[in-house]
Amino acid sequence: MGVAVPFLLWLVLVLGTVSLVPYLGRVFGRGYYMATYAGLTIVANIIAIKLIGLGRFIVPSAVIVYSATFLITDIADELYGRKFAHQVVMAGFVANVLAAISIWIAVKMPGLPFQEDLDRMFSSVLGPAPRIFLASVVAYLISQNHDVWAFAFWKEKTGGKYLWLRNNLSTAVSQLIDTVIFITLAFGGVFPWSVIGSMIVSQYAVKVLIALVDTPFCYLGVRFGSPAT
């Protein structure tokens, strides 16, 4: 079966779940946007250490869940405006800072003698270098806030029409910003620049494909979140 089929099933599962968040937010409160968004960004940072191969492309396993966060903010922006979408982004930022601090402390805490092997595995998976975390934070703040701004910008320019265009334009540019900043800051000077360039192209190509696939889910989310639904 390879990697392609599980990857596609995972993609549909995540995007489908995200498209239901607006319904939950409409019925039970907007906090569902923030909770889902924060959860996805925390999970993305934890699983990003594992790389997977998709044909010629090598990408972090977090590429699906992190890409889905842009779908959440686009739907939030469409239904409730730019201010609320920015609040969702900042809620995710706070949650990730708290998660990073908690994980760092847990890694540094001495383990028990009978758990030495487990402790080493725990530290190797959950103890990324400070440079990686810094690169992630910088890329996150710039790209996510740009996505919110860009979606609102194109919404104004199109008079609220062409949701598919606004969704893809804002996400495609924001994902490029995120990919270039993160990989450059995290791995610049560590790997040859030719490798850095290949990593950027590979990851961005997959992210653009995900952005195209998430378009119908964006329409579903807006429909589910609309008061008229």
Image (tube, rainbow, N blue to C red):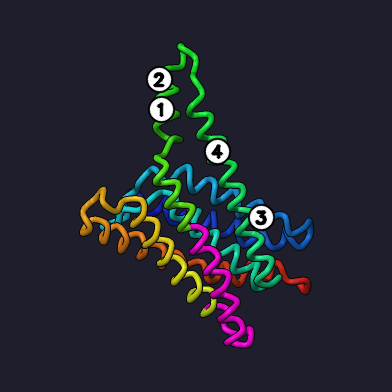
| Residue 25 in sight here | yes
N-term-proximal mark, 4 vs 1: 4
Residue bounds of the magenta highlight: 140-164
29 vs 163, left or right, is right
Mark 3 vs mark 4: give the one in front: 4
Kindly report the distance in space between the C-alpha atoms of the residues bearing marks 4 and 1.
19 Å
Looking at the picture, which amino acid does disc 3 mark?
Met
Q: Is residue 169 above or below residue 56?
A: below
Kindly report the distance in space between the C-alpha atoms of the residues bearing marks 2 and 4.
23 Å
Looking at the picture, which amino acid does disc 1 mark?
Met
Q: Position of residue 224 (x, y in %)?
A: 69, 67
Q: Position of residue 227 (x, y in %)?
A: 78, 71
Badge 1 vs badge 3, beta-carbon distance below 8 Å: no
Q: Is residue 185 above or below residue 114?
A: below
Residue at x 49% of width, y 69% of height: 171
Q: Which residue is mark 3?
A: 34
Residue at x 58% of width, y 52% of height: 93
Kindly report the distance in space between the C-alpha atoms of the residues bearing marks 2 and 3.
36 Å
In the rendered structure, find residue 117 and report the number of the disc placed on it.
2
Looking at the picture, which amino acid does disc 2 mark?
Asp
Check disc 1: other Cα within 10 Å, few if <14, some if 14-19, many if 20+.
Answer: few
Badge 2 vs badge 4, beta-carbon distance below 8 Å: no
Q: Position of residue 141 (x, y in %)?
A: 52, 59
- The quarter of the picture where residue 197 lies is bottom left
Q: Position of residue 186 (x, y in %)?
A: 36, 51
Q: Which residue is mark 1?
A: 121
The answer to which of 190 and 174 lies nearer the viewer is 190
Badge 1 vs badge 2, beta-carbon distance below 8 Å: yes
Looking at the picture, which amino acid does disc 4 mark?
Ile
5 vs 215, left or right, is left
* Kind of element beneath mark 4: helix
In the rendered structure, find residue 101 and report the number of the disc placed on it.
4
